Image (cartoon, coloured by chain):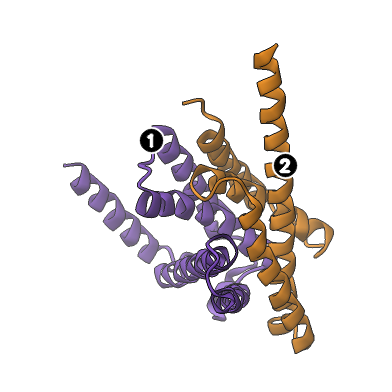
Amino acid sequence: MVESLALVVDIKILIVTLGLFFVAALMEIGGGYLVWQWIREKKGILMGLIGGIILFLYGIIPTLQPSHFGRTYAAYGGIFIISSIAWGMIVDKKKRDRFEIIGSLVAVCGAIIIFYTPR
Amino acid sequence: MKQAIFLLLIVTALKGAKVNQDIKIRKILITLFFFLLAGLCEIGGGYLVWLWLREDMSWMLGAIGGFILFLYGIVPTFQPSYFHRIYAAYGGIFIVMALLWSLKFEGIVPDTFDIIGAAMAGVGVAIIYYAPRKGEEKLWSNH
């Protein structure tokens, strides 16, 4: 009973952590995308400034996380890769190619090994 | 002995790349430099914001951190590729940098699984970003 309670708490922490990571990835990629629109697509400096503000807000999110850097952040790298490819498909409407998919799978497997291997 | 084999592998790879005109070693080094620069800006900027909010230091540090994070957003625009591909590859670089960061600043030595995982992230980056694509040779020669 006590053990399963502890497990529930663990899962709660896991969900909160993962949720924060996805929000962080969304803001990081979104902010970067607006800066990209400004410089590479010549869409005006306003885009770049809004992107900069979003990136600043992104910097605040990790301060809400219970732990800092290390393996947790390696997991974030994996989430970041998936989010980037998803962003390209959904927002940017860019076709992803074979190498992007295979390479992403390999890198995400690496992140999973780092984060989930029981020690 | 291990180091010698490692060096030999690198030299062979470099020579192979010279013969193969598709992959230009110089471009690889430049793009890797931009990836690392982006990582330093992200971690450095984020760290200053952290000092402001979590360590109760001056808001000036937070403002400087915010500006560095803005610069972080500019660095990938120097990369000669597509937005989503650059960012996906950067995620793999980030995995490796996170482990190096915790080794240097938290003294946590990576174990075997960390190293295997980091190596896989590196291979992933190589496939995502450096696999030569047909019709994209121009993308790399323009910059």
Q: Quadrant of residue B84?
A: bottom right
Could you say where residue B9 lies in the image, as x and y percent from the top left?
29, 50
- Distance, label 1 to label 2, CA atoms, is 26 Å
Which chain is depicted orange? A
Viewport quadrant of the C terminus of chain B:
bottom right
Residue A59 left/right relative to A37: left
Residue under label 2? A16
Secondary element under disc 1, as helix, strand or loop, is loop
Viewport quadrant of the N terminus of chain B:
top left
Is residue B105 in view from this perspective?
yes
Colour representing chain B: purple
Residue drawn at point x = 21 percent, y = 47 percent: B3
Q: Please tell me how crowded label 1 is: few (under 14), some (14-19), or many (20+) other residues with Cα within 10 Å.
A: few
Q: Is residue A70 above or below residue B45?
A: above
Kindly identify the amino acid type of the residue bearing the numbered disc 1. Answer: Asp
Checking the image for residue B111, the label placed there is: 1
Subunit that carries the residue with mark 2: A
Kindly identify the amino acid type of the residue bearing the numbered disc 2. Answer: Val
Could you say where residue A14 lies in the image, as x and y percent from the top left?
68, 36
